Image: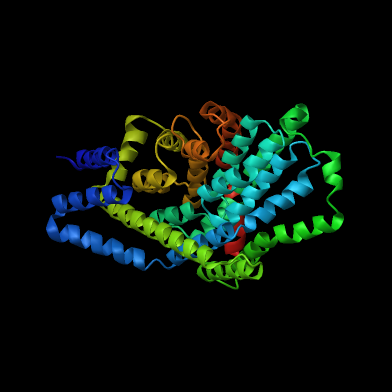
């Protein structure tokens, strides 16, 4: 059997086993180990597992993963995000669609605190959605707002997904995070512009707060809420400014962020044993899950490297089909969009990255820039029917009056905005590469 056929058999076996419902890292690691033993004998299989484990343990930036997850859960479990939404509620209420715009801003800050889209979805669905519906905002529009805003969690740093991509693509985590800043803020601005224009044309979609209710909030209360709401932003600044200015490395900055979040929760009187226990348990669970996934992905990628599957894929796209480099890149993005209808972002990366990342490098594209493209495509895939990840999270968290068809309808304009953002980053790579280039060159 040729090496090309062995690679196809590995890939198809993995997809088939994933349909059984087994854990993703177990399936991928099992296929990698069985293939290695079949190809190179017992010693080769054992050496493969040992070598990838050592590689994982020696990857120093991996220490940022539990620190940022811990920081995010401290801020969410201690309910510091409630202050943020109350701040936006008061300051943005007089603007048509202002609470929806404030929700997008909330999601940007939550993304900077946590790095997971699930956290943004949970906060948006439990804090923002009931308030928006009570204020007679259009239910279709606001469910789309929360889904689109929560998707920013995997693009705005500190993104946990980018940590996984960095390990597989062997790229610096710091550069990837900095590369996600401007595209993430650009996408948030595009969401805000869409909401503002739509509510200006049809004010009934996002009515302003009544004048009587606005008059009840004094200037002193507004200032107090502003100080309380900006606390998470101050934590993010305390963490990232030393890193950007070169005084700390990424790992030290992650520790500063975790300590600052913990101290803020203690000072505000929000840190209890329940919050500490819940935060620690969830941090440990997610960190271990990602480490197992990374280990399985490294083993799978090592076998694929040994089979030279990337060369076969390059011959297929460039020689047999006759695509150019940009045609291959667009085809990759379409593949991610298709996979995203039934897989989450981590599964997509682990399954396809061992093939695509070396091919992207061979075609001459920047792997940091491609990491941003992958992440934006994952955001779109999260919201793509019929089985987009965020669609079912919203259905599980939304009140009964929000139907599944409402959720499907709500994402159409926001997916359009995301596709525009993806096209802009593809056409103008400096949107992603300018900031990391400026910081690291200095």
- Residue 377, image x, y percentages: 50, 40
Q: How many marks?
A: 0
Q: Is residue 164 left or right of residue 150?
A: left
Residue 336 in picture, x, y percent from top left: 43, 38
Left or right: 81 with respect to 29? right
Q: Residue furthest bottom?
A: 247
Q: Is residue 183 visible?
A: no
**Position of residue 62 measured from the top left corner of the image (x, y, whole percent):** 43, 64
Q: Is residue 62 left or right of residue 240?
A: left
Question: Would you place residue 116 above or below residue 52 in this image?
Answer: above
Res 97 quadrant in image: top right
In this picture the colour scheme is: rainbow
Q: Residue at x 57, y 71 (%)?
A: 259
Q: Is residue 85 left or right of residue 32?
A: right
Q: Is residue 183 above or below residue 280?
A: above
**Quarter residue 171 falls in:** bottom left
Q: Which of 425/348 is in front? A: 348
Image quarter of residue 417: top right
- For the N terminus, the image quarter is top left
The residue drawn where x is 71% and y is 30% is 205
Q: Residue 327, how many percent across, how many down?
A: 45, 33
């Amino acid at each position: 059997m040729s090496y090309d056929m062995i690679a196809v058999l590995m890939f198809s076996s993995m997809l088939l086993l994933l349909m059984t419902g087994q854990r993703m890292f177990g399936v991928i690691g099992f296929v990698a180990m069985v293939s290695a033993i079949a190809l190179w004998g017992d010693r080769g299989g054992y050496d493969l597992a040992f070598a990838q484990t050592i590689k994982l343990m020696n990857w120093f930036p991996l220490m940022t993963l539990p620190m940022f997850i811990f920081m995010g859960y401290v801020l969410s479990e201690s309910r510091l995000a409630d202050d943020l939404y109350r701040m936006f509620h008061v300051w943005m209420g007089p603007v048509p669609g202002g609470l929806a715009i404030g929700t997008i801003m909330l999601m940007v800050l939550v993304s900077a605190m946590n790095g997971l889209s699930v956290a943004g979805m949970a906060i948006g669905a439990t804090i923002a959605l009931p308030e928006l519906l009570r204020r007679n905002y259009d239910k279709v529009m606001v469910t789309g707002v929360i889904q689109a805003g929560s998707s920013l969690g995997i693009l705005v740093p500190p993104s946990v997904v980018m940590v996984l991509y960095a390990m597989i693509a062997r790229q610096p985590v710091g550069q990837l995070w900095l590369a996600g800043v401007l595209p993430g803020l650009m996408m948030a601005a595009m969401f805000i512009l869409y909401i503002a224009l739509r509510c200006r044309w049809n004010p009934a979609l996002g009515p302003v707060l009544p004048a009587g209710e606005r008059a009840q909030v004094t200037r002193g209360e507004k200032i107090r809420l502003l100080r309380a709401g900006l606390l998470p932003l101050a934590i993010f600044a305390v963490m990232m400014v030393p890193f950007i200015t070169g005084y700390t490395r990424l790992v030290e900055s992650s520790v500063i962020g975790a300590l600052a979040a913990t101290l803020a929760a203690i000072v505000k009187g929000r840190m209890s044993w329940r919050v500490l226990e819940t935060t620690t348990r969830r941090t440990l669970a997610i960190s271990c899950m990602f480490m197992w996934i990374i280990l399985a992905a490294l083993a799978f990628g090592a076998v694929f490297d040994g089979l030279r599957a990337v060369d076969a894929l390059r011959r297929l796209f460039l020689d047999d089909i006759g695509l150019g480099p940009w045609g291959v890149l667009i085809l990759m993005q379409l593949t991610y969009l298709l996979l995203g209808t039934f897989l989450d972002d981590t599964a997509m990366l682990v399954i396809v990255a061992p093939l695509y990342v070396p091919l992207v490098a061979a075609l001459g594209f920047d792997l940091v820039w491609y990491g941003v493209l992958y992440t934006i495509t994952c955001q779109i895939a999260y919201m793509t029917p019929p089985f987009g990840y965020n669609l079912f999270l919203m259905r599980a968290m939304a009140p009964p009056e929000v139907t599944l068809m409402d959720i499907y309808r709500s994402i159409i304009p926001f997916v359009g905005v995301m596709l525009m953002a993806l096209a802009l980053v593809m056409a103008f790579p400096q949107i992603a590469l300018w900031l990391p280039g400026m910081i690291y060159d200095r």
